[in-house]
């Protein structure tokens, strides 16, 4: 009754207003459902009756902005916005953007990896911006940016970025050829260019996974982990049935893609909870791929199971299958996805998770594929989305700027060491591997405690000419220039990282620092420089390192903690992610060899301090 009275009052007001009644009705609907508009500023009305003003030429005509106030009905048990609800809003905004460009109905074909950076609470506003990055033949990529706004404090914060692929269809369901999209701004031109690379990545995703599994050893070593015995994966299995009703359908009569994604997120969360016996947080979603439509009246069967558990995250596989009214009939595979969950403690840090014991056969296949997918996710996140290859990493070496370069070399490593949010990725015996994920780089740290004095370890590790004695990747290291007592330049030759490539060579500035005061560590920093005397050669592939080195903390007079840091560059990234994902133990084996090298040589070392 109140809603009817309110609407009648508004319509009565129209008689004395220059605003058309349909504008009032549209405003009412937008207010109830959430606003969607092509830009932040409402387009002005043309003074000529019966005409509308044209969009501003500076605005992307496909851009859609949506703002939603988070209400209690949108949240989970913690009072945070449900990820399923957020996926619905993302899919709606992206679909509106795609249809603006196509001028006809569009369906969701896929949704790329999504990484959630923050949670959203009741009372905050979700702002979603979507626009078409590039149109291909009958498909187009839509870029989506999601942020939240705190109305009380005025704070704005990024939540996630996503890329969705939509296909245009005519009323009969046939694909429609799309017109080309011309980017206007520098940002749009960049996204337009990279969209082709992302499309290629999507098309070769299955082959990439298959090749990675073929090249990886079938029997991977299980990491050592504190806690109870492994949990059988079968105990995490979930199956749920949903009846597709008219409110679940889109404007074309098919099941709304965002609704299917929300249902999948729900069963995946239950499966993750059965492993950790806690309330997990969804951290990332790997590519949703819609294989076919479903309609009102269909029964959707959603299945989920934990495929693999890493040190502080787990992958849950989930699929959706559609049946007709007779569930005994043939099933249709609608969608598949893989979701990564973490369990946060009271301080917001990821907790260690129990291991998973896969089922023989299919379970073991899913277990290995989960490790491969983790590597691929890291590759996609830090290679395809970033522009590291556009900027040279080496800096020219010159005697006039040696002080600055040495300072910059050491300070960059110390900055990396001081960063928070290092996450323990693997642990084998005494060797621990940590990762740090940032916007542009994937960094790793590998450490071990060794029975050696810190100054002895410092002296042995700072001489790159001896690194081949414990690092099998190093072939040779020549001292090119002794800058001073603490700075040296080496020409290093390493083995090729794959059989097809030539050996790599590096020109590296090594800067070493002793502790300035008690409690400070010993530091040996490395970064690439260029020298006129050592140009790139056709016999080698010139490699580069941006920031790497050793940090050695004395734990006692005869005990030290030795840690190696590296901010992975594109040429080295494949090797890094393979180890992080657990598909290789080269990191651990190399550092174990380093420990043996230190123990063997400490008695024969004359340390000059």
Image (cartoon, rainbow, N blue to C red):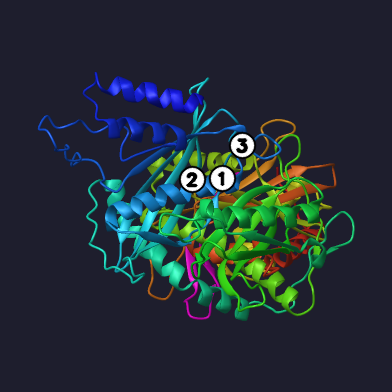
Q: Quadrant of residue 128?
A: top left
Left or right position of 370 against 235: left
Residue at (64, 44) in percent of width and height: 523
Which residue position is annotated with label 1?
Answer: 85
Marks 1 and 2 close (CB-CB < 8 Å)? yes
N-terminal of the pair, mark 1 or mark 3, is 3
N-terminal of the pair, mark 3 or mark 2, is 3
Q: Residue 89 carries which label?
A: 2
Left or right position of 33 against 495: left
- Closer to the camera in the image, 434 or 75: 75
Question: Is residue 378 positioned above or below 117 on the image?
Answer: below
Is 538 one of the magenta-colored residues? Answer: no
Question: Is residue 152 positioned above or below 548 on the image?
Answer: above
Residue 493 visible in the shown view: yes
Residue that protrudes farthest toward the left in the picture: 48
Is 511 one of the magenta-colored residues? Answer: yes
State how far apart marks 1 and 3 are (Cα).
10 Å
Marks 3 and 2 close (CB-CB < 8 Å)? no
Q: Which numbered disc, 1 or 3, marks the residue closer to the eye?
A: 3
Left or right position of 435 against 43: right
What residue span does the magenta drawing correspond to?
A: 491-512
Marks 1 and 3 close (CB-CB < 8 Å)? no
Which residue position is annotated with label 3?
Answer: 73
């Amino acid at each position: 009754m109140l809603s009817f009275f309110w609407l009648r009052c508004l319509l009565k007001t129209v008689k004395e207003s220059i605003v058309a009644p349909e504008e009032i009705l549209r405003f009412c609907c937008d207010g109830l459902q959430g606003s969607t508009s092509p830009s932040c500023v409402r387009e002005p009305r043309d003074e000529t009756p019966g005409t509308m003003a044209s969009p501003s030429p500076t605005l992307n005509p496909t851009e859609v902005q949506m703002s939603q106030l988070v209400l209690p009905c949108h949240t989970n048990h913690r009072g945070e916005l449900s990820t399923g609800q957020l996926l619905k809003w993302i899919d709606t905004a992206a679909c509106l953007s795609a249809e603006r460009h196509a001028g006809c109905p569009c369906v969701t074909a896929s949704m790329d990896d999504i990484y959630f950076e923050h949670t959203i609470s009741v009372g905050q506003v979700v702002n979603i911006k979507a626009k078409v990055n590039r149109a291909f033949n009958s498909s187009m990529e839509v870029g989506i940016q999601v942020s939240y706004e705190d109305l009380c404090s005025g704070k704005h914060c990024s939540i996630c970025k996503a890329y969705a692929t939509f296909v245009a269809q005519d009323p009969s369901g046939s694909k429609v050829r799309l017109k080309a999209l011309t980017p206007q701004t520098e940002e749009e031109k960049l996204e337009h260019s990279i969209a082709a690379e992302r499309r290629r990545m999507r098309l070769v995703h299955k082959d990439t996974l298959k090749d990675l599994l073929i090249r990886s050893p079938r029997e991977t070593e299980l990491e050592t982990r504190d806690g109870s015995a492994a949990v059988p994966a079968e105990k995490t299995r979930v199956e749920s049935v949903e009846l597709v009703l008219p409110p679940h359908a889109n404007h074309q009569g098919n099941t709304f893609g965002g609704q299917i994604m929300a249902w999948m997120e729900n069963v995946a969360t239950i499966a993750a909870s059965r492993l950790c016996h806690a309330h997990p947080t969804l951290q990332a979603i790997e590519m949703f791929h819609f294989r076919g439509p479903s309609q009102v009246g269909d029964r959707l069967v959603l299945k989920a199971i934990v495929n693999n558990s890493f040190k502080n995250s787990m992958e849950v596989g989930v699929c959706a299958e559609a049946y007709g009214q007779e569930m005994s009939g043939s099933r249709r595979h609608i969608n598949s996805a893989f979701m990564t969950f973490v369990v946060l403690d009271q301080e917001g840090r990821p907790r260690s998770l129990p291991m998973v014991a896969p089922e023989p056969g299919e379970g073991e296949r899913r277990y290995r594929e989960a490790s491969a997918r983790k590597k691929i996710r890291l590759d996609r996140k830090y290679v395809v989305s970033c522009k590291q290859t556009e900027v040279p990493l080496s800096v020219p070496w010159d005697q006039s700027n040696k002080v600055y370069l040495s300072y910059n070399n050491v300070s960059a490593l110390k900055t990396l060491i001081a960063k928070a949010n290092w996450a323990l990725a693997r642990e084998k015996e005494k060797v621990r591997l940590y990762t740090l994920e940032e916007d542009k780089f994937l960094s790793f740290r590998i450490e071990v405690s060794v029975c050696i004095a810190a100054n002895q370890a410092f002296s042995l590790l700072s001489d790159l000419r001896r690194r081949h004695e414990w690092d099998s990747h190093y072939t040779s290291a020549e001292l090119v220039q002794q800058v001073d007592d603490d700075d040296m330049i080496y020409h290093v030759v390493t083995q090729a990282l794959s059989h097809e490539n030539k050996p790599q060579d590096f020109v590296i500035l090594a800067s070493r620092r002793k502790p300035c005061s008690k409690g400070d560590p010993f530091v040996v920093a490395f970064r690439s420089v260029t020298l006129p005397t050592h140009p790139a050669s056709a016999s080698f592939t010139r490699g580069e390192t941006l920031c790497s080195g050793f940090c050695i903390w004395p734990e006692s007079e005869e005990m030290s903690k030795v840690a190696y840091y590296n901010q992975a560059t594109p040429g080295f990234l494949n090797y890094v992610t393979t180890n992080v994902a657990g598909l290789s133990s080269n990191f651990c084996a190399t550092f174990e060899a380093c420990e043996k090298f230190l123990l063997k040589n400490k008695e024969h070392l004359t340390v000059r301090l």
